[in-house]
Image: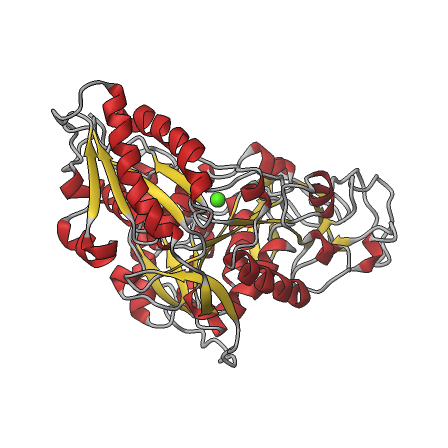
Amino acid sequence: MDAAVKGKPLYIKMREDDNVAIIANEGGLPAGTKFPSGLELREHVPQAHKVALVDISENGPVIRYGVVIGYALQELKAGSWINENRLRMPAALGLENLPKATVKAVKQEPLSGYTFEGYRNPDGTVGTRNILAITTTVQCVAGVVSFAVERIKRELLPRYPNVDDVVALEHHYGCGVAIDAPDAVIPIRALRNISLNPNFGGEVMIVSLGCEKLQPERMLPPDVIKVHAVDGQASQVCLQDEVHVGFMSMIDDIVAKATVHLERLNARKRETIPASELVVGVQCGGSDAFSGVTANPVVGFAADLLVRAGATVMFSENTEVRDGIDQLTARASTPEVAEQMIREMAWYDAYLDRGSVDRSANTTPGNKKGGLSNIVEKAMGSIIKSGSSEISSVLSPGENLRQKGIRKGMVYAATPASDFLCGTLQLAAGMNLHVFTTGRGTPYGLAECPVIKVATRTELARRWHDLMDVNAGRVADGEVSIEELGWELFRLMLDVASGRRTWAEKWKLHNALALFNPAPVT
Ligand code: CA
């Protein structure tokens, strides 16, 4: 692949039977460009966009990743640019008769001896950060809590150097919602599980309004607090409580309760912990046609290393795996795991159908500009993040790994593909480290968990040099192999888990929590 470095024209073909390839050169290539294979471009083809390698007849299949990603809407001669306007998308795969647990993953040697410096929690989980999170039951309290958090950061935090941050778990749920609707279980359990994320050290502090539908006991029942919180107890502030006379009384109460938690968090020390305690959530956003060529294969290789080290890795994004569901059910460890995956897809198909759309609603203008013609092509590049391990478990949206007894392996955590919803639900699942790949570029970050961002292209990594943590464009440039960069990413994950700051943390770039609420609002 090192031809691209020297400025020679280069295309990247993924599989032997593909009849298209993507242009690797920055800025694309002009009409008349000749490749060593003899192929000549008939028109300008932008970087990351597809070129026909052979003549494709009208209605003929267009094949990338060894999969039909569409049918030609017109005759496409060899050397033609293939974009979303020249392709008809295939129908979604049926969910009947899928292969179940038919692929036996090659047994890989376990990896031992890899560790990081983390924080052990009373419930057995391990944190990579030491954060005081203030849980809220309803959006009504958000302004008061953020006022208090500002004061805590200004006046208290400098006295507690071992505490990384104070974060209000603010959200739009809690009232004005059909809280007894069957699907309301998703946002409620998500909020409960986010409050107990390993990066919060088992310190549970709840601020409620008083009259909201989501009462504190419903969000965090006493038996849950007993298991997960330090000393089995949470502290609570209720703004409508009669003890509060005036705004400052509420602020003083929140600050006083926070002080107790900060004292305890500050007394904690990092200790050496096996890599098996990592819970890594992977996702992509702002994808381009390089995502499936550089960044996602690198993440997939690192994911396999994590699984070999006994860690837990989650991949997600329902609409971005839907078109590859046959590959995933085949990789399931058992037919039951495959069935669970199919149930999640069927539920999501029905959810989209209720809104009169389907999976094709996923792709964005940026995806198309980046060469991704449709969701089928995007999905093929997306699922590569999951590596090659067997898929051993499935989580429904908002569920938590530990509560389901899942302690290791490659997990399909069903979530929407929206970056914020996916990240929020992976936090609920128990993620303590996040890896995010992007081709178009996004400054995405979370206050609750470190996010390692991987650029798919060197041009993006160069332009966003102080936002991207890893440049996977080096793979297309011929500088490193997927395996070499996969190892590099694996080691970086251990460093970041041990406290090394990511760019998003350095600039304090935090996206809001975004709950997935498929239930009605009132
Ligand atoms: Ca995403």
Q: Is residue 236 above or below residue 270?
A: above
Observer able to see residue 112: yes
At x 87% / y 42%, what residue is drawn? 32
Query: Residue placed farthest to the top in the image?
Result: 246
Query: Residue placed farthest to the left in the image?
Result: 242
Query: Residue placed farthest to the front in the image?
Result: 159
Left or right side of 310 for 15: right
Left or right side of 280 for 214: left
Q: Position of residue 2 (x, y in %)?
A: 81, 59
At x 52% / y 77%, what residue is drawn? 113
Name the image quarter holding residue 13: bottom right
Given residues 287 and 272, the one toward you in this image is: 272
Given residues 68 and 322, the one toward you in this image is: 322
At x 15% / y 29%, what residue is drawn? 210
Observer able to see residue 66: no
Name the image quarter holding residue 133: top left
Q: Position of residue 206 (x, y in %)?
A: 24, 39
Q: Position of residue 140 (x, y in %)?
A: 26, 25
Given residues 390 and 349, the one toward you in this image is: 390
Q: Position of residue 24 (x, y in %)?
A: 75, 49
Left or right side of 486 for 382: left
Q: Is residue 107 above or below residue 67?
A: below
Q: Is residue 228 above or below residue 188?
A: below
Q: Quadrant of the C terminus?
A: top left
Given residues 213 and 246, the one toward you in this image is: 246
Q: Quadrant of the N terminus?
A: bottom right
